Amino acid sequence: TRTWLRATRVSFNAETVDVTSLDSEGGWRELLVGAGVRSAAISGSGPGTVAAIGAMHALHAAGRRVPDDVAVIGCDDIEMGAVVTPSLTTVRIDRERLGQEAVTALVALVEGRRVESPLLPVELVVRDSG
């Protein structure tokens, strides 16, 4: 995550970016609730929207309000993000192109060619969570 932020020249404070495994509600609670976080961009190893919804659940259980106390942004824009309350702000990724690039990279690796990681275009979909 930090490497991507630097590569894309996104301005950020390295002390406020945390990369961690959040595979349980306890992990969410420790990172988001205990630390008094004001905003969180969530990208999971599975669907990022599902991970962000889990974060919103943990925040709600701890009495924190989204987006009033903490803004939450997911990544992947699956339909579920539009129907939860509050609806989830997300980063939309062209999954078809992502799949095409992955297959192209896999073929190149099998053929022994060098693989470059392309930066794919994304779109911020602003909804109620942040």
Image (tube, helix red, strand yellow):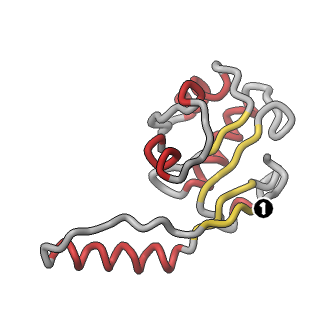
Give coordinates of residue 27: x percent, y percent. 53, 30
118 shown above or below 4: below
Q: Callout 1: few (<14), some (14-19), or many (20+) C-alpha neighbours within 10 Å?
A: few
- Please name whichever residue, 4 or 69, is drawn nearer the observer in this view of the structure: 4
Query: Which residue is at 53% across, 58% downward?
Result: 47
Is residue 41 placed above or below 31 in the rendered structure?
Answer: below
Q: Quadrant of residue 82?
A: bottom right
Q: Amino acid at mark 1?
A: Val
Q: Is residue 70 left or right of residue 21?
A: right
> Which residue is more in the foreground, 29 or 35?
35
Secondary structure of the residue carrying tag 1 is helix
* Residue topped by disc 1: 83
- Percent coordinates x, y for residue 64 in the rendering: 79, 29
Residue 4 screen position, x and y as percent: 47, 49
Q: Who's the residue at 33% across and 78% down the image?
A: 103
Residue 21 in which image quadrant:
top left
